[in-house]
Image (cartoon, grey):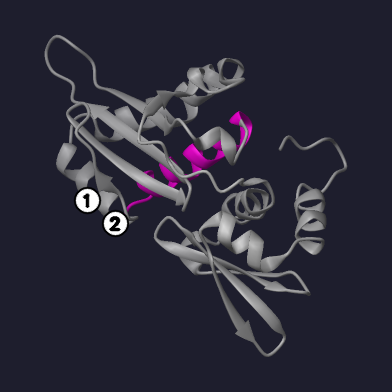
């Protein structure tokens, strides 16, 4: 979702949530649904935490580690968009996503270059940072971890160590099914949110 001047980016996603069936939404999103005094609470796993939405009042609560504006916004967008498609288990580059080529240079500047600079010379630190936010190791590059941004949205960050001949590098990859849940602009925001958490790791 791209914001136009004067528009609150939460407005449209929240309208969709107001009209939604919480049980169906939870099932499609891979979230849990529990009864609470005020109605029903949908609990959505987000990286290493959870964001919850209480129905029918549509109150949003997030655990502190996933309480950023971007993650809360992406969570409500995801809830309204996901069609329930499971990850395919096949990684694609950002440019291979439908409509991804337009933002590819931005992804390189805002995600890949900072990760390469921070961790290309210290793979052990990358290990620690990735594991601290729920990353699972993948057999790609010199070091790679996948992250469940949301239950159906799997993102991978792969780091190539630098040496005397080659500079360090990093790539962000997306499960091929990600476009069933978020558009390229939103997936870029999600990758930036993951990179931000990694770059703020206590070990940095």
Residues at marks 1 and 2, CA–CA distance in whole angstroms = 6 Å
Asked if residue 111 can be seen in this view, the reply is: yes
- SS for callout 1: helix
Residue at image mark 2: 132
Q: Quadrant of residue 33?
A: bottom right
Residue reaching furthest to the top: 165
Q: In the picture provided, is 134 more to the left or to the right than 92?
A: left
Identified at 61% across, 45% down, the residue is 83
Q: Nearer the viewer, residue 68 or 137?
A: 137
The part of the chain drawn in magenta is 184-201
Identified at 11% across, 13% down, the residue is 164
Q: Residue 80: x percent and y percent?
A: 69, 51
Identified at 52% across, 19% down, the residue is 104
Which label belongs to residue 146?
none
Q: Main secondary structure of the magenta part?
A: helix
Q: In the picture provided, is 49 more to the left or to the right than 33?
A: left
Q: Quadrant of residue 75?
A: bottom right
Residue at image mark 1: 128
- Image marks 1 and 2: residues in contact by CB distance under 8 Å: yes
- SS for callout 2: helix
Q: Nearer the viewer, residue 132 or 116?
A: 132
């Amino acid at each position: 979702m791209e914001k136009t001047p004067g528009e609150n980016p939460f407005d449209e996603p929240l309208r969709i949530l107001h009209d939604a069936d919480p049980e169906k939404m939870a099932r499609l999103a891979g979230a849990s649904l529990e009864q609470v005094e005020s109605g029903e609470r949908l609990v959505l796993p987000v990286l290493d935490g959870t964001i919850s939405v209480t129905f029918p009042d549509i109150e949003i609560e997030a655990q502190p580690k996933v309480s950023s504006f971007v993650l809360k916004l992406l969570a409500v967008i995801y809830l309204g968009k996901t069609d329930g498609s499971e990850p395919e288990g096949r990684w694609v580059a950002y440019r291979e996503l439908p409509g991804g080529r337009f933002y590819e240079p931005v992804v390189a500047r805002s995600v890949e270059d900072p990760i390469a600079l921070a961790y290309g010379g210290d793979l052990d630190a990358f290990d620690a940072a990735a594991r601290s936010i729920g990353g699972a190791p993948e057999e790609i590059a010199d070091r790679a971890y996948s992250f469940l941004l949301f239950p159906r949205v799997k993102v991978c960050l792969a780091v190539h160590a630098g040496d005397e001949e080659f500079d360090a590098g990093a790539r962000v990859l997306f499960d091929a099914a990600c476009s069933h849940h978020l558009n390229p602009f939103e997936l870029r925001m999600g990758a930036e949110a993951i990179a931000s958490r990694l770059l703020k790791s206590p070990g940095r």
